[in-house]
Image (cartoon, rainbow, N blue to C red):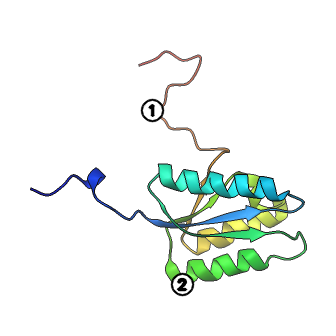
Amino acid sequence: MEPLTEQRNVTGPIVFGFLRLVGVSARRQQALAKTITDYCRRHELTLGGVYMERCAATSGAFVGMLDAVAATHPYGVVFPTPSHLGPRAIAADRRQRLHEAGTEILLVRGARPPVADEWAPGSTAP
């Protein structure tokens, strides 16, 4: 008899992480990287690498990540919060580029679309 899937070493979908670290301490950087790693472990995702943008003036890390996305076609890119996409004008462009690449944007914390069947405070529970 075959072992259960939970008892086998199963590889989940590949994702990349992205951190925007402009003016962030080394300690905060480590905490954010751990946040992405923990998220991937909880959701059974294989983390292919974490790209880090440390300068507001250049987007070399994001372009490098887009190159990796184009080459590997991962399931998605994990961001700790929406702010890691950058300021509004930049974030909109980056969302569009990721969408065009056919990859999902996964947020550890942040806005998520409401689920129709989900119980909401103030409504009657099913």
Residue 32, label in figure = none
The residue shown at (81%, 59%) is 26
Q: Amino acid at mark 1?
A: Asp
Q: Quadrant of residue 114?
A: top right
Q: Amino acid at mark 2?
A: Ala
Give how far across and how far down residue 91 sits, in percent: 77, 63
Question: Do the numbered discs 2 and 1 sit on residues whose CB atoms are within 8 Å?
Answer: no
Q: Secondary structure at mark 1?
A: loop
Give how far across and how far down residue 70 sits, in percent: 57, 82
Residue 5 vs 118, above or below: the answer is: below
Q: Secondary structure at mark 2?
A: helix
Q: Which residue is mark 2?
A: 71
| Tally of marks | 2
Give the number of the mark in front: 2 or 1: 2
Q: Which residue is mark 1?
A: 117
Horizontal relation, residue 30 to residue 35: left or right:
right
Quarter of the figure that contains the N terminus:
bottom left
Extreme residue toward the left, this view: 1
Question: Closer to the camera, 44 or 31?
Answer: 31
Give how far across and how far down residue 55 sits, in percent: 87, 71
The residue shown at (67%, 73%) is 97
Residue 126 vs 4, above or below: the answer is: above
The residue shown at (58%, 77%) is 69
Horizontal relation, residue 15 to residue 12: left or right:
right
Horizontal relation, residue 26 to residue 45: left or right:
right
Give how far across and how far down residue 29 sits, in percent: 76, 58
